[in-house]
Structure formats: structure tokens, C-alpha cells
Amino acid sequence: MKILMVNKFLYPNGGSETYIFKLGEYLIQQGHEVQYFGMEHKGRCVGNAINAYTSDMDFHNTFKLKKLIYSIKTIYSIEARKKIRLVLDDFKPDIVHLNNFNYQLTPSIILEIKKWSKDTNKRCKIIYTAHDYQLICPNHMLYNPNKKNICEKCIGGHFINCIKGKCIHGSLAKSVVGAVEAYFWNLNNVYKYIDKVICISKFMKQKLDTNPILKNRTIVIYNFTDFERNILGKKGNYILYFGRFANEKGIKTLIEVCRMLPNINFVFAGSGPLKNLLENIKNINNVGFKSGEDLKKLIQEARFTIVPSEWYEPFGLTIVESLKMGTPVVGSDVGAIPEIIENNKTGMLFKCGDVEDLKNKIKRLWNNEKMLYFYSKNSMKNNFNTIESYYSALIKIYKK
């Protein structure tokens, strides 16, 4: 089969990029042809045969006139339609697999895919992997970054609440653009042209199904990880947090707990806007961003890891990676986290944002070697998707 993988960023930038690179590579190994469409960028590492991409759009480092032009282009992109048409004409894909496309590429590309399919009389399925809540929430997160709490006010198409809450980067102007974009494409019913929406958790499916257009198109396939199941090794004398240092990740709650438990060692691995809060706390060792074998070693040797998120985590890859290494997880009871952690079997759930509950769960597990071993042993019995099992589920959708 010929698969056109679409994502706004075609360079290493986050989880969706890791997904398209690894999935594309595996599809090629299975004998399929894969090309990519997205924005041009100096770091681009995948592409298409005719080198057709949209112009790089940097919202942060540009002058005011360009920002005004960008505001229009984030709603509807003539350039994206023209460029993807060139790729469609040349590659003639059987599948267009959409990932993150809003704002930089815009849903206008969906209209062009359907137009091309009609003009050429060629059947072309549109598959979308939802990595966040973009189709029902203009800021992608169902989270108000100003009030720092979970927010579902836009569900049901009430996107005016994005403006009221200044939910996109705390900016009224950006929030207006985001709300207009959401209203425009929902009123134009463009998402009806997507054949299948792959949700990365049951929780995400439940939220996306609140949109009547999406309800009968969603299917759950849990994300894959390339972490191999490991043997149960010797544990160190620390608890690990790895990920982004940001409010929605519950970092402030965790730091408060760290201060309350001065005799327990915590290791933080990552980066983010709140990294300064980790300074001058004696029982916190911030080792910075880690990846590859360095990260695996940190996870494997941790007594357990903490996932204190205070937004609706759509999946929880850090949990899967921990459990694959035989390391239990203490996580908040929101989003998809309760789907991944088997409470009192592979870890513990605590009430989201509750300092006392988190503190008590940490103390209980830290001081109970028997319970820790039980959780660790159960963690090794996981059946999370590998790239092979993920492909088996995906190819059925492609061919159906």
C-alpha cells in the first residue's frame, strides 16, 4: 500500500513525531511505500519525492504583520492545499494518515484530499490518529492554563469559552483565532470526511465521542513503545519523575510532597518552564533531560515512578515505559492514567492534586518492600502494544 503520513512537524519535536517516524519505518519494513507531508524546516528528516512542503511558520519569533498573516493561515491555508495536491498527484496514496495538522497545515488539506480523490476517481482513505483533544478543544488539552485546572467548557462546540478563558498561551488574540478556527471547521462539517479516528485510550474515545460527527468513527488502539520487557533488576534508593516540568504535569504538587518527605530521595529527569522550582531542595536531584539507555537505567533502578498529572493525560507513555522496566507507578486518577495502572497491582492511584493522598501513597509504598516487590513482579506481566502488535491492528483499519 501507499501511505502518505501527514504531520505539521517533520523533525524530532515530541510524541507525535516519534510516532510517525517509527511507524513509517516499520511500514516500509513490511513492504509498504511511505512518504511524508508537513512544514519545511531546517531540521526536517523525512519527506516526499517532489519536496513539496508548506512554509515554516514560527509563531513566537516574528514581527506583527507576519503574525497577522499567520492568524489567517492558521484557519485556512491555500498554500497547504496546493502543496499537498502536488504530493497527491505524484504519489497517488491509498491512505492519507493524518496526525497533528491543525493551525500550521489546517483542516483545509482534508478538503483537498477529498477533491483529489473525486477528480482522479481514486479511493483514498483518510485515517487520523488523535494525539490530543484538538477536535473538541482549541487549546488541545481540555485544560485552562491560566486557572491551572481541567476544563471541559468547550465540549459540545462551545468554543467561545476558549476566548473567555484566554486558553491559548494566555493570549486573547490567539484564543480568538483558535476559537474561530474551531467554529469554522465544525460548522463546515469537515471532519465527516475522516474515515477512522484512532484514539490512544478509552478515555480519549469517550471525550471525542461527545462530538456527534466523530462518534461512529472512533476506535481505540493503545500507543506502542519500543521499550522491551526487562528482567526484574536491583532497585536503587530513589523515586523517579521523568517528563516535562510544567503545571499541568502536577510538578508543584509533587515538589510540595518532596519537601514533606525529606528522608526520601527523589530524582527528576526532564526539562520545562518550572525547572527553577527544583533548586535548593536537598532531597531532589535534577539530572536534566535523559533519553535512550540513560533513561532506561534510571527507570529500571528506581523503586517506583510518579506520574502526578493534573490534566487529562490522553495515554501515559511514561507509565508504560516504567512498567515495561518492572518499575511500579504511583499516578493521579485522571485521564487515561487509571487505564494503564492496575490499582494495587502494578502501582497506586491517588486523588489528583491531593498533596496528603500522594504523600501517604508514597510513604506506604516506600516503606513496604513486600508490596513493592509484588507490584514490580506484576509490572513485568504487561501486554502493552509493541510496534508489531500495533501494526497488526492498524493494517486492518487500512484495509477495511
Image (cartoon, rainbow, N blue to C red):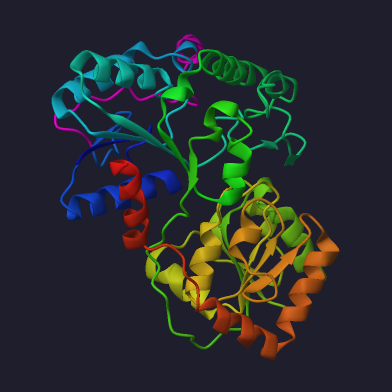
Which quarter of the rendered picture does the N terminus lie within?
A: top left
Task: Answer yes or no: is residue 13 visible.
Answer: no
Image quadrant of residue 83?
A: top left
Percent position (x, y) of residue 27?
24, 50
Percent position (x, y) of residue 142?
66, 37
- Look at 65% across and 76% down and name the residue there: 345
Q: Main secondary structure of the magenta part?
A: loop
- Look at 22% across and 36% down and name the residue there: 47
**Is residue 278 on the magenta stretch?**
no
**Near-viewer residue (237 or 370):** 370
**Near-viewer residue (118 or 386):** 118
What range of the chain is rendered magenta?
47-71
- Look at 32% across and 38% down and name the residue there: 10
195 left or right, relative to 159: left
Image quadrant of residue 303?
A: bottom right
Percent position (x, y) of residue 393?
37, 53
Q: Vertical placement of 92 versus 45: above or below?
A: above
Query: What count of labels does the image hold?
Result: 0
Q: Vertical placement of 353 versus 365: above or below?
A: above
Seen as rendered, the residue at the extreme right is 356
Which quarter of the rendered picture does the C terminus lie within?
A: top left
